[in-house]
Image (cartoon, rainbow, N blue to C red):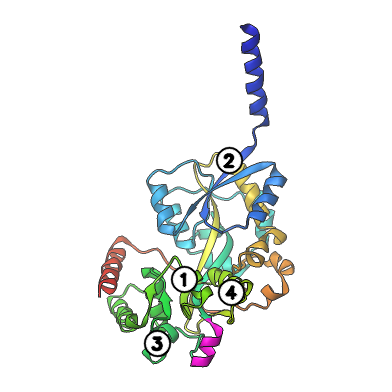
Amino acid sequence: MKKLVLAATIVALSGSALARDVLRVFNWNNEIAPVTIKRFEAQCKCDVQEDYYGDSEEMLAKLAAGATGYDMVVPTTYAMQALIKQGKTQPLDRAKLPNFANLNAGYLKLNAPFDPGNAVGAPLLASITALGYNSEKMRALGIPTDSWAAVFDPKYLGKLKGRVTVLDSQRELMSAALMYLGRDANSTSPADLQAAAAVIRKAKPYWAAFNNQSYIKELTVGNIWLVHGFTNDFFQAMHDAKAAKRNFTIGYNLQKEGNILGLDNLVILKNAKRPDLALQFINFLLDGKNAADVSNIMGSVNPNRAALSYLQPEIRANKVIMADPSRDRLVLLKDLGAKDRRELNRLWTEIKAR
C-alpha cells in the first residue's frame, strides 16, 4: 500500500513539474495571428489561452459581472478608460518593456487622454471604420468612395438601392453621420444628434440592412456593393474575392470628412495571476518583426514604427493600413456618461423602429 501511495505521489509531482505555464488573454477574435501566438509559445515554453468577445460592451459587461481568471485584455481606448476608472488594471512595468520605445508617438498621443501618461496600455493595432466597396460598380456608377456621402446622400443612394449595408452600431453610424455633417463625431449635443438622426432616416430606405455579421461575405460574393464597416474586414474580403476569382475587386478607402479609429491596447488586469508572462507577451508583440504580423496577416493599421521594415510591399502601398494620425483625420470614440448613453439609446431605438 505504501509503495502504491509513493508511486502515485511521484507521478503527481512529475506531472506538476512538467505542466506548462499558461497566459490567459481575453481578446477580440482574429486580433492576433495564430502564427504569432505559436512563435511566442515556443519562445516562452508556455501556452496562451484566449477567450473571445465580439465588442467592447460585451467585454466590459463580463468583467463587471465578475469574470475572472484573465491576465490580460485587449480593449479599445474608451473601454480601456472604463477599466482604468473601475480599478481593474495595473500599470505597465516599462523597465521590462524595452520594445515600448517602438511605438509611434502619434498613436501614444491619441491614447493619452484615455490613459494618462500611457501608464496602462500599449497600442497593438488599429482598425478604421470606413467604406468598403465593389470597385467596378463604384466606378461605373460614379460613386465617390472618399466621402460619407456615398452612404448618406440620396443622390448616390438612388443608384445603389438595396446594395448597401451599414453597421448595426449606434456609436459608429451616428458618428459617421456627424462627420458627414461636419460636426464632432463624439458630440452629444441634442441638436447635433437630431441632425445626424435625420440624415440616417433619410438614407435608411435605400439600405439593404443594418449588418455587423455577414457583410464581409455579402461584399465578397457580390450581393452588396457598398459597405460601412471595418478596414480589417475589408482586407479579408479583398483577399477572399481574389482567391475565389470573382469578376470584380474589393476596395476600401478613407473618407475626407474623417474616420473613427479603433485603437486596441494590450492591458494587464489588476488581478492577473501571471503579470510576468503578460509583460513578456507584450514586449514580444511590440518587437518590430512580430508587430508586422498584425498588418501583413490581419490587415490592421500598425502603430509600431519598428514594424515598417518588415511590412510586405503591398501593405506599405496600402494608404489605409499606413494611415497616420499626423496626416489623416482619425477620431477616437469617447466613453459616454450614463445620461448621454440613455439619450443615444432612445434615439437609436426610434431610428431602428421607423
Q: Is residue 192 magenta?
A: no
Q: Nearer the viewer, mark 2 or mark 3?
A: 3
Disc number at residue 215?
A: 1
- Residue reaching furthest top? 1
Q: Nearer the viewer, mark 4 or mark 3?
A: 4
The alpha-carbon separation of the residues under discs 3 and 1 comes to 18 Å
Categorize mark 4 by other alpha carbons within 10 Å: few (<14), some (14-19), many (20+).
Answer: many
Mark 4 and mark 1 lie on one chain; the one further toward the N terminus is 1
Q: Secondary structure at mark 2?
A: loop
Asked if marks 2 and 3 touch (Cβ < 8 Å), the reply is no
Residue 240 in the image: state x and y as whole percent: 59, 70
What's under tag 2, amino acid-wise? Arg
Q: Secondary structure at mark 1?
A: helix
Categorize mark 2 by other alpha carbons within 10 Å: few (<14), some (14-19), many (20+).
Answer: some
Q: Residue at x 72, y 70 (%)?
A: 312
The alpha-carbon separation of the residues under discs 1 and 2 comes to 38 Å
- Write down the residue under mark 3: 157
In the image, 61 versus 133, the foreground residue is: 133
Q: Which residues are magenta?
A: 134-141
- Write down the residue under mark 4: 241
Residue 328 in the image: state x and y as whole percent: 56, 79
Mark 3 and mark 1 lie on one chain; the one further toward the N terminus is 3
- Write down the residue under mark 2: 274
Q: Nearer the viewer, mark 2 or mark 4?
A: 4
Q: Is residue 268 above or below residue 54?
A: above
Categorize mark 1 by other alpha carbons within 10 Å: few (<14), some (14-19), many (20+).
Answer: many
